[in-house]
Amino acid sequence: MPKPRIAKETFEALAARAGLPLTPAQKTELYEAYGYVEAMAERVRAGGKRAPLVEPATIFKARG
Amino acid sequence: MTEIQTIAEAGKLIAARKLSPVELTEACLARIERLNGTLNAFIRITAERALAEAKAAEAALMAGKSKGALHGIPIAHKDIYCTKGLATTAHSKLLADHVPAEDAATVVKLADAGTVMLGKLATHEFAWGGPSFDLPWPPARNPWNPKHFTGGSSSGTGAAVAAGLVLGGTGSDTGGSIRGPAAYCGVAGIKPTYGLCSRRGILPLAYSLDHAGPLAWTVEDCAILLQAMAGHDPQDPASADVPIPDYRAALAAPIRGLRIGFVRHFHESDNPSNAAVKKSLEAAADTFRRLGADVRDATLPSLEDWHACGMLIMMTEAYTLHEPWLKSRPQDYGDFMRDRLSLAAFFTAADYIQAQRMRRELCARYAEAMQAFDLLLCAATPFEAPLIEAVTKMSSFERPSLTFPFNVTGAPALALRCGFTDAGLPLGMQLAGRPFEDALVLRAGHAYEIATSWSKRRPAIVS
């Protein structure tokens, strides 16, 4: 399991901002798993090298 | 051993009036009575309704009014498929009393094709939270060894088909939820092209990744079920408006000359598989060569890329659906679903958009890779079904998924058995193709299946 890079206090602040009613045990468990979130978020950014013209796959098309 | 027919076999016997739909339904109900207490495949059994439908099918067939290959065939639906007047719970306390007013579009199509519905099948909670022991119903268990996991989330469908409790069933696949159970339960299951089968009336997990599809004992049976399920639905915004070929008729063409890309790096380095899986895949590649296919190594982006992209999209889309309940009724979820999904709250909108941009890139690279191949062969799971108690809450994140690439691309992907371990647990593989070439994927799977003998073997529990 990748270790989270942020401190637990920061994680708890993010959890509070998200508005999730987490128990202390859940906070501990989710904090331990937070490294997965960081890893996925980093991976989809491709190191910031993605060309601006690459559009999201969800791009909206107007219909007549 | 009690003989369990395939859909194709039963259909022939029914058409020849050598087998009655009532007899067939009664045989399935008897197996359910005997085995469901161990396997937990069904969470709701509709025996009276099933027998009434079977009798109606019999009467229609005797009057010469056949609806085709599925007329009188017993099936069941994953309990995220809405069934009118019959509870559809997503295996969750939150929807324990949810009784839909309408059938899902594919439920209607399968009913119109003459199937007999035996009930609702176990699933992971909301198609992701499982295997969970803290839900209103227990998780399904693997008929090959009930101490082992079925795979998920179409867990009940995989178990029910493998044990002959039904001849076919519906599943859904957002990240592998048809193919995982197909591989672990030793049956066939296809995640069709995205949009081929209507999602309307199927409780969603992630809008842009959810696929509806069938599981059955054989690839031919999957083709028969898919024929009924596929088709444009103007009320599903993702529904593809494309001609639907005759999937069953297309099975017969030989596969000589087909170019098959063997994506070895998926199971050799990206998500290292065990020796049994590796050996079974090499043997499968050799079988395809003997059938005249041109099998060569293929390279796709790393599984870590597919996994990050697909999982982030899945989690964030699912979170938007569940956010109100996660905040107001967290105690009514099972731990697995609640905590897995809570992690999604930490992704940002920018994360989601980046994942969708990555999705476009990955789809382009897939299309480019598929210029050299007609089909891909790869692993479905890195090992055989584990013990059910060994599946951890965060297991979805521990290894990059072998199945996500084909949800991200929307390409058709079939899982089918390709061997057994020494302990008698099934091993599975995947065949995948280009979007809307589902018929070709099924053809190759069928050719492999009839060239091997894996489908002759049923779980010992069925005897």
Image (tube, coloured by chain):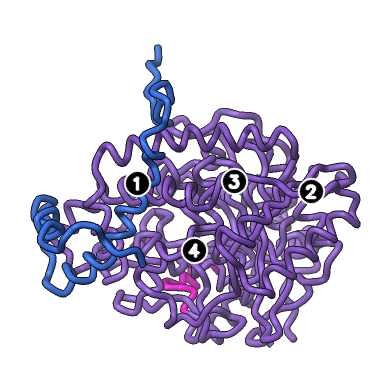
Residue that badge 4 annotates: B154
Task: Count neighbours of disc 3 (C-alpha within 10 A) and say few if under 14, some if 14 to 19, many if 20 or more.
Answer: many
Whether callout 1 and callout 2 share a subunit is answered no
Name the residue: 79% across, 48% down.
B296
Can I make out residue B43 in this image? yes
Residue that badge 1 annotates: A42
Q: Is residue B70 left or right of residue B343?
A: right
Q: Residue B145: percent from the left, percent from the top? A: 58, 85
Residue that badge 3 annotates: B192
Disc with the residue nearer the chain's start (4 vs 2): 4
Q: Determine the CA span between mark 1 and mark 2.
A: 33 Å
Query: Chain B is which colour?
Result: purple
Specify the segment rendered in magenta: B40-53
Disc with the residue nearer the chain's start (3 vs 4): 4
Q: Secondary structure at mark 2?
A: strand
Query: Chain A is which colour?
Result: blue
Name the residue: 58% across, 37% down.
B231
Instruction: Identify whether B160 is placed above or below A8.
Output: below
